[in-house]
Image (cartoon, grey):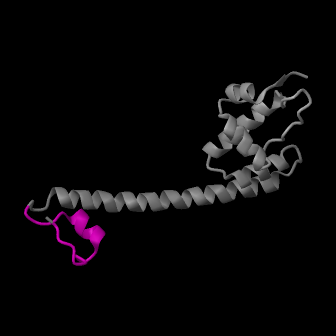
Amino acid sequence: MQTLTIGKLAKTAQVGIETIRYYQSRGLLPTPDKTTGYRQYPLSLIERIRFIKRAQELGFSLDEISELLSLHGNHQRDLIQQITAARLAQIRSKITDLERIQTVLTQLLSECEHTNPDLPCPIIASLGGANNGIEYT
């Protein structure tokens, strides 16, 4: 079985050494024994690291990733689907919040662009509430 040092594993998987150590501390990657004076990592960990990174890109937390990894190969699609559905619901909620924020900021920007320059900018006034004793200059 071909193995790699932590440095070569990190370089091949395109992550830092500290990332590998962090994943090990979280239980996402095993920590091999030092049989030759330094740890040797199996090539199969490259794909596992890529799985972790891709799952993170899709918004999964490390706890969720750990659970997904534990379910891999166990034919427990229902649990995998539940984890994914929960993440999707959170993402949809964030999108709704971001769309609301976008609407408010678009409206404020438009108001500021079309307000008399001698008056306070509606953006600042809106963020400060009903003036709150703040002087706008």
Above or below: residue 126 compared with residue 133? above
SS assignment for the magenta stretch, majority? loop
Q: Report the quarter where the N terminus lies.
A: top right
Q: Which residue does the image show at 80% across and 56% down from the upper left?
A: 79
User: Looking at the image, which is closer to me, 124 or 95?
Assistant: 124
Look at the image and say whether residue 126 sits in the magenta stretch. yes
Q: Quadrant of residue 137?
A: bottom left
Q: Which residue does the image show at 19% across and 59% down from the upper left?
A: 112
Part of the protein shown in magenta: 118-136
Residue 98 is left or right of residue 132, and the answer is right
Residue 76 is left or right of residue 116, and the answer is right
Above or below: residue 63 compared with residue 69? below
Residue 110 is left or right of residue 88, and the answer is left
Look at the image and say whether residue 45 sits in the magenta stretch. no
Q: How many marks?
A: 0
Which residue is the extreme one toward the top? 2
The spot of residue 108 in percent (x, y) is 26, 61
User: Looking at the image, which is closer to me, 57 or 77?
Assistant: 57
The spot of residue 7 in percent (x, y) is 72, 27
User: Looking at the image, which is closer to me, 80 or 116?
Assistant: 116
The spot of residue 12 in percent (x, y) is 70, 25
Above or below: residue 119 compared with residue 132? above
Q: Which residue does the image show at 71% across and 45% down from the upper left?
A: 22
Q: Which residue does the image show at 88% across and 33% down from the upper left?
A: 34
The spot of residue 8 in percent (x, y) is 73, 24
Q: Quadrant of residue 18?
A: top right
